[in-house]
Image (tube, coloured by chain):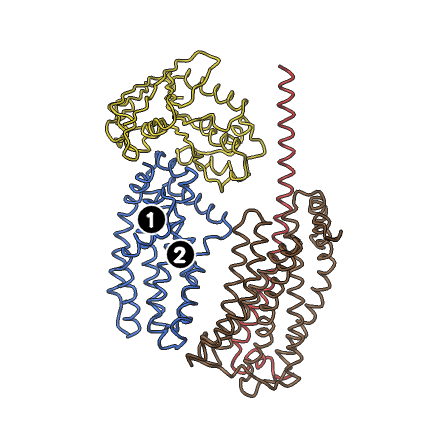
Amino acid sequence: MSGDKLTQLKAQELACIKRDKLLFNDLALQVEPGEMLVVAGPNGVGKTSLLRILAGLSAPEDGAIFWNDVSIDNIDSTFRQDLIYIGHKLGFSINLTAIENLRFWMQQRGQVPSEQSIIEVLDELALVGMEDVLVRQMSAGQQRRVALARLWLTPAAIWILDEPLTALDKWGINLLQQKMISHVQAGGIIISTSHQHFAVDIPVRTLALEPNWL
Amino acid sequence: MTVFWSVFRRDWLLAFRQNAEFLQPVLFCLLVVTMFPLGIGPSPATLQKVGPGIIWVAALLSSLLALEKLFKQDFLDGSLEQLVLTPGSLPMLALAKVLVHWLVSTLPLLILSPVLALFLNLTWDMYWALLCTLVLGTPLMSLIGAIAVALTAGLNKGGTLLGLLLLPVYIPLLIFATSAVESASLGIPFTGQLAIIGAMLLFAIALTPYAVAYAIKVSQN
Amino acid sequence: MHFDSFAAFIDMGGYGFYVWTSFIVTFVGIYTLFIEQKWRKKQLKLAVVKENDRIQRIKKAKEKASQANSDE
Amino acid sequence: MWKWLHPYAKTEETYALCGRLYPWFLWPAIALLAVGTVWGLAFAPADYQQGDSFRIIYIHVPGAMLSMGLYAGMAILGFIGLVWQIRTCYMGIAAIAPVGAMMTFIALFTGAVWGKPMWGTWWVWDARLTSELILLFLYLGVIALYGAFDDKIQAGKAVAVMSLVGVINLPIIHYSVYWWNTLHQGATISKFDNPSISSDMLWPLLLNILGFGLVAGALACRRLQNEILTREMRRPWAQTLLLSNETGAK
């Protein structure tokens, strides 16, 4: 984990307009290493939009995001290399197997994929025997765990997780929470949307988005 | 380059996972060509006259059908947003996707083109010119088409909108390609038209990947 | 025998190319359908073996997990 | 329905039935085709008009006949399947369709190769050729439709309906194409219509027609067996069968 180097995410004056509706305006936030930020608020308030903006997927209407004081739009920014974003969608092709998907994911990240390491991670996520099944044939919880396998396979300083607990059972939630705790303790950053009660005390900050009905 | 090849391999695998669905646009093209003699009569002289135009229009229509699927599944399952976030170069990746798409859905059309030429009673010279224009023209179609497909990936409606966007853009290609075949039928050299299509293709290879990459980003907004 | 010599048989009165292409394509075509089915059955067998292997592995992993639970 | 139509008993029994029928189709087919083809190629007299090129008839006509016969067979299976809700019939359609498509392809290909020396061109928009081409598209449509569904029972129903639609449409297509062709006076070919054919020419043709039919039967059996096995892969009887017998025969 890249906890030894100073990593910090900063956003200034963010504004987001979706379907001609102003979701938020002049929003500033800063996340330090070893910290978790929970974005809270009622449905439709723009949690997912904010996360997508922070991940660099969609462009904010106004404002800028800095990763280690370099704008994430800057070509020199290491942000994409340091980021894992897991959204509502799986991010995996449903017509490929878990191994094929994860191998492709690692290649995209410049990692050299080894079948053995992928299988080990899948075993840890209780996906034994599911390695060569097409993702489309898996249950929702299994698909979710394949998507989350990215967190185990690829070291990254910042995780942006949109509703990471969706479709997971109690065992899976517990496993993911432990992984999140160890990530934060090692100096990583997590930005997430779901409130959780962690067994271990980790620094969690909450950013409450207010409905901005105009 | 590893980015390019890993995307290439992935898309190649995906194409063959889907029950040879990629052959459907080619069959569609064949059917469209079959409809014309039934519509205008089987007279060999007439068919020879209108043949090149028919084949090109059929190829344009079938490529529209095929292109529609270029980013659809990736958009739906979220692969596309992950690809946007990868450290690798997005234009390169777009180029790889278009290349695979051309190989699996348009190359069969080229292989089938002798049959089309026979159906429409083209002479050997005309067929040769037609093949040259198809080889240079269809990649151009895929590259330009990919921009519009990426732009409309997020929309639930696709088909007809894509046609509205793309068919006007394809007009120059159609004009030069059919004029090349006509020149060939008259025994006039058609290198001029080929050179123009070739130039357009080179231009497209250089520029469209960036446009497609931008369009993919727009689709994620 | 209709033909005088083997060469005449191959030549088919000048239509050799057409006659022989038709026959060869026809029988090769039918033969490929048989081969394809043989191949398909082989794939099926492999799939069943793989599937059983998978079930075994899942069983083993479950046993391991339940053992670990009882140890705690 | 009757007890023997019970779906679970049925597939297994159909599998066994196909296995028993297969050699009865295959070996006579090989024998008939060998005799018919050698007779037709080497011993039958040449046509006074077309010379030796007419020998293509020995595969062209069986191919064309089977292309239509198999489609009719598919439609009959589709009808039975839809009326009595038997899914083995749907599998049968899926098993026959590629064989029929291959026969149609053979008819078209040999027709083109025959046409080249006779009419000087590989292809003309003759009424019979055109309807044969449309038949090929109908077959390919059925195959594509079956492949498009994940749920193969649903796919089977769709294919059954489609083949019924096709079989009602086929005569209409054929006559409309015929009418279209005479209307246009484009390329009418009467050379194929050879009313009197000597018995020396006829016998090998009959042998080959029968041989082609049996080969198609053998292929359909084999395909149906594999289709059943694919679909019932997880049933114990299919598992023991696939794991135990290594030769693949029966």
Task: Judge the density around disc 1: few (<14), some (14-19), many (≥20) Cα neighbours within 10 Å.
Answer: many
Query: Is residue D112 in view from this perspective?
Result: no
**Amino acid at dot 2:** Thr
- The quarter of the rendered structure image containing the C terminus of chain A is top left
Q: Chain of mark 2?
A: B
Q: Chain drawn brown, letter? A: D
Q: Residue at x 31, y 42 (%)?
A: B213
Give the color of chain A as drawn. yellow
Q: What residue would you read off at disc 2?
A: B106
Spot the red chain and give its letter: C
Secondary structure at badge 2 equals: loop
- Residue A202 in view of the camera: yes
In the rendered image of the structure, the colour used to display chain B is blue
**Res B44 label:** none
User: Which residue is outermost to the right?
Assistant: D3
Residue highlighted by disc 1: B146
